[in-house]
Image (cartoon, rainbow, N blue to C red):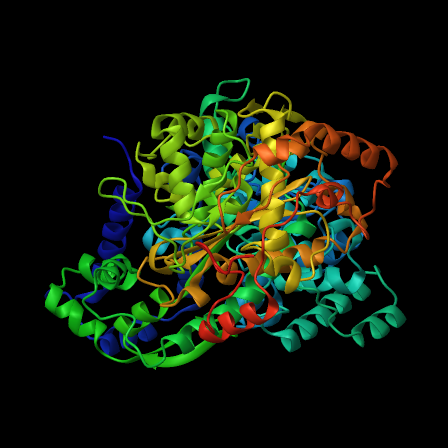
């Protein structure tokens, strides 16, 4: 029969009961009282008896310990690692995520640990550790018998709690690596015996310096931080090799009680404990008394830097990255056939994110969304946005952790509803930080469902490298990523259909009537309700005129448009329906940004790239991801240039003009606003020579929206985020290349676009073609003689041809425009769907 910890405990229990029974009963078998037992024992007191009893007691203890030691050695209480196994110790080490500029923007970890080598740790740390935890570290072989007997005598017999611990650094290392088991009242003695065994084997396997390094890489510092490398970064924002004496003393002092001596939570206690460590260092000769006194007077010097899964830069990007890496590791195992683990292997993952652009993007989102939420709350102040039984609230209510917990406890729906109706004190997230409030759990669900959300993505147009990624307004509270989620794109989808029209032979100067026309059951109208006149392709796109866009897709055919949308990368969920020109299909911001790259990348779409290379914990290359061959031709270079010119017109004089008027963006830039039905989604897509920037704003539930176009259009909701981002990015000379002039179109292509954006009467391109030779010669002369321009005074495509335009059609007088604004006070040149006629 196999001996188990349970059976051994049972045998020991039976033996002790049998021994007790001998003194618990008298000769007649009567059970004695405790007083009678004591009296009998005192009457039989003799020195010989006492010595005999002491000998029996000591022998029993020694025998028990030896028996327990044998049981542990035999593996009855679990496997004890061999020296060969100890030689292969590997800690769970956090993988670090690097931005392209070398900044650590986050980690993947089970235990937040940064593995460091011995020469990467300041010797001051080792001195503080030895002086405080194990003064005879270099004298013993894993077990310090002097310290052990001192602890037994002073702590156990005299009750002196200041005697310190008897465990050596090697024993503590064993405890850190191999977790203790639960064996009832034998748990502590079994753990101590096992740790002593492992400590002796560690000493035979490793040099003393290696044991110190292993220990410092495994020891916990609280806050889910493990190892001196991660602790140095967390509490002092530095590397372990750069720690000062006073910093090292703080960290070593934390080892006695991580929470009690946490310098962030309890700074006074941490300083007191630091000074105790300094006294120990002075006691054992590592520092002089004068150094101890001066160091003890110094302030804490805490430089707290908390980079966790949910905090730090680009948390939504890291969430996306984790999924992508898991898929790659699944298909690409290690050379030995085992699987890479990004949570334990200490990998170094180098990404395309630019930490500075990421900060700019996060700041832009925060600033605008905080202000927009205030406007939104005021907009709904005297109205009812949500009712408790609305589908969106019911769905969020059933997805809450509180609901799931109560359901797991077997509570009925009625009981759960009752809990959700009782006011409780809670902390809620606000744009001004966490606030304490008293509300019902159901009200808190409604509260969080009333926030506007945002997604923002910045990508390098020519390479596809992702430079900034903001998936929401706060990762800790809202983890749904609005960069990868799909929503209706509205008018930002129009440029793809316009490009298809140019590719199939439609002239950029072909004019389309701004008329309300029914195409079967579909009768697309303009959001401002204005009709009349004619728009060229450029004018129709610049002013986002729905009637013109509808006429274009009907002319080229839905199938043709659908085929081109596939080329742009939209392969899922795009119906063969004419309404797609108005952005009725659900698409992701990630796909939109990639598709827009074709316009400024000579007609080729760039695939988004998130990672450039992955290294192991020693810095050895595992894989690199080149940026070559990741572009796909979609449209011709000429068509791409024409669409870019049209997108510039959107910013210069169309629905995106706020970018220049309100945000002062002077660099060459094109863009497109988008607003979906009932202002559910607001979009802005911006393009410069080197960057594509996409922004989406809306509610997580589509019921969260503004009730007016003026407030809920893309130019109001999404465009300002792009504007705030560009205000920061254009100030840095480092990013000058991203804001250079666009590639100039050929003379013939420029000439083919020379026509008004709008005409009150039918405009025939033939009047332009009759003077085409003269115009081309003029353009060539202008191109040869003009200055290339600078970022401060940029050359905007179209500057050279404005003087060559044909006689302008009759425009409204200033008085006519003035009186029209008086009649329509809410009109705004920035509004979509055929705003004020330019």
**Residue 129 in the figure: left or right of residue 555:** right
Q: Is residue 46 above or below residue 168?
A: below
Left or right of 254 on screen, residue 518: left
Question: How many marks on residues?
Answer: 0
Quadrant in which residue 800 is drawn: top right
Residue 753: quadrant of the picture: top right
* Image quarter (top left, top right, bottom left or bottom right) of the C terminus: bottom right
The answer to whether one can see residue 566 in this image is yes
Query: Residue drawn 57% across and 41% down?
Result: 93
What residue appears at the point 64 percent right and 56 percent down from the top-left corner? Answer: 725
| 201 with respect to 67 (left or right) | right
Depth check: 801 or 274 in front?
801
Identity of the residue drawn at 78% across and 41% down:
119
Q: Residue at x 51, y 65 (%)?
A: 828
Residue 486: x, y in percent?
38, 44
**Residue 834 placement (x, y as % from top left):** 45, 55
Q: Quadrant of the N terminus?
A: top left
Looking at the image, can residue 464 be seen?
Answer: no
The x and y percentages for residue 116 are 69, 42
Q: Nearer the viewer, residue 681 or 805?
A: 805
**Is 201 or 95 nearer to us in this picture?**
95
Quadrant in the rendering for residue 600: top right
Residue 510 location, x and y as percent? 51, 36
């Amino acid at each position: 029969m196999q001996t188990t910890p349970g059976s051994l405990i049972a045998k020991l229990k039976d033996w002790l009961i049998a021994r007790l029974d001998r003194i618990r009963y008298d000769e007649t078998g009567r059970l004695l009282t405790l007083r009678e037992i004591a009296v009998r024992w005192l009457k039989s007191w003799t020195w010989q008896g006492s010595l005999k009893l002491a000998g029996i007691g000591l022998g029993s203890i020694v025998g028990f310990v030896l028996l327990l030691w044998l049981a542990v050695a035999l593996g009855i209480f679990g496997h004890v690692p061999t020296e060969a196994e100890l030689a292969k110790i590997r800690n769970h080490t956090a993988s670090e995520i690097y931005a392209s500029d070398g900044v650590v923007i986050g980690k993947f970890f089970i235990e937040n640990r940064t593995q460091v080598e011995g020469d990467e740790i300041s010797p001051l740390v080792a001195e503080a550790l030895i002086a405080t935890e194990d003064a005879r570290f270099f004298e013993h072989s894993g077990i310090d018998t002097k310290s052990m007997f001192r602890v037994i005598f002073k702590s156990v017999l005299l009750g002196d709690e200041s005697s310190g611990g008897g465990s050596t650094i090697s024993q503590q290392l064993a405890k850190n690596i191999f977790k203790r088991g639960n064996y009832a009242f034998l748990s502590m003695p079994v753990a101590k015996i096992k740790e002593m065994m492992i400590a002796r084997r560690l000493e035979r396997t490793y040099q003393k310096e290696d044991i110190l390094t292993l220990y410092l890489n495994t020891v916990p510092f609280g806050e889910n931080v493990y190892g001196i490398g991660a602790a140095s970064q967390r509490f002092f924002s530095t590397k372990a090799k750069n720690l000062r004496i006073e910093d090292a003393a703080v960290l070593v002092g934390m080892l006695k009680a991580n929470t009690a001596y946490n310098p962030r939570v309890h700074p006074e206690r941490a300083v007191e404990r630091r000074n105790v460590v300094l006294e120990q260092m002075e006691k054992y000769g590592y520092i002089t008394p004068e150094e101890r006194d001066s160091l003890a007077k110094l302030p804490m010097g805490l430089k707290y830097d908390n980079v966790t899964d949910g905090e730090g830069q680009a948390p939504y990007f890291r969430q996306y990255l984790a999924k992508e890496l898991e898929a790659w590791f699944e298909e690409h195992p290690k050379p030995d056939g085992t699987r890479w683990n990004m949570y334990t292997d200490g990998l170094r993952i180098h990404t395309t994110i630019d930490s500075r652009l990421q900060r700019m993007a996060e700041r832009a989102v925060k600033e605008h969304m905080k202000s927009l939420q205030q406007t939104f709350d005021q907009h709904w102040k005297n109205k009812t946005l949500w009712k408790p039984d609305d589908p969106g609230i019911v769905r969020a209510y059933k997805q809450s952790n509180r609901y799931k917990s109560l359901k797991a406890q077997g509570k009925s729906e009625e009981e759960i509803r009752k809990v959700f109706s009782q006011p409780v004190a809670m902390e809620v997230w606000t744009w001004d930080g966490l606030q304490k409030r008293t509300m019902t759990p159901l009200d808190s669900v409604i509260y969080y469902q009333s926030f506007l959300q945002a997604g923002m993505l910045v990508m390098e147009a020519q390479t596809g490298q992702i430079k900034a990624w903001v998936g929401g307004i706060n990762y800790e509270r809202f983890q749904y990523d609005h960069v990868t989620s799909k929503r209706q794109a509205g008018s930002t989808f129009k440029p793809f259909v316009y490009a298809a029209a140019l590719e199939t032979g439609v002239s950029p100067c072909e004019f389309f009537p701004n008329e309300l026309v029914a195409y079967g059951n579909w009768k697309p109208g303009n959001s401002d309700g204005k009709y009349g006149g004619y728009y060229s392709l450029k004018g129709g796109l610049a002013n986002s005129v729905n009637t013109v866009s509808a006429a274009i897709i009907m002319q080229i055919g839905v199938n043709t448009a659908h085929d081109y949308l596939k080329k742009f990368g939209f392969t899922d969920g795009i119906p063969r329906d004419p309404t797609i020109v108005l952005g009725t299909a659900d698409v992701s911001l990630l796909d939109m940004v990639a598709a827009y790259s074709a316009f400024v990348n000579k007609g080729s779409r760039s695939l988004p790239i998130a990672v450039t290379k992955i290294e192991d914990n020693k810095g050895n290359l595992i894989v690199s991801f080149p940026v070559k061959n990741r572009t796909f031709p979609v449209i011709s270079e000429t068509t791409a240039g024409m669409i870019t010119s049209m997108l510039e017109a959107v910013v210069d004089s169309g629905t995106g003009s706020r970018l220049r008027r309100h945000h002062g963006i002077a660099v060459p830039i094109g863009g497109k606003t988008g607003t979906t039905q009932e202002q559910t989604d607001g979009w802005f897509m911006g393009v410069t020579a080197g960057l594509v920037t996409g922004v989406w704003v809306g509610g997580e539930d589509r019921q969260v929206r503004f009730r007016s176009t003026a407030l809920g259009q893309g130019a109001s909701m999404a465009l300002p985020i792009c504007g705030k981002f560009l205000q920061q990015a254009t100030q840095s000379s480092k990013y000058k290349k991203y804001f250079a002039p666009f590639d100039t179109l050929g003379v013939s292509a420029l000439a083919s676009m020379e026509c008004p954006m709008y005409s009150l009467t039918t405009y025939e391109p033939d009047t332009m073609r009759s003077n085409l030779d003269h115009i081309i010669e003029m353009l060539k002369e202008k191109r040869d003689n003009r200055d290339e321009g600078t970022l401060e005074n940029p050359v905007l495509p179209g500057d050279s041809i404005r003087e060559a335009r044909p006689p302008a059609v009759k425009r409204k007088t200033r008085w006519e425009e003035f009186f029209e604004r008086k009649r329509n006070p809410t009109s705004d040149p920035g509004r979509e769907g055929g705003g004020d006629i330019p």
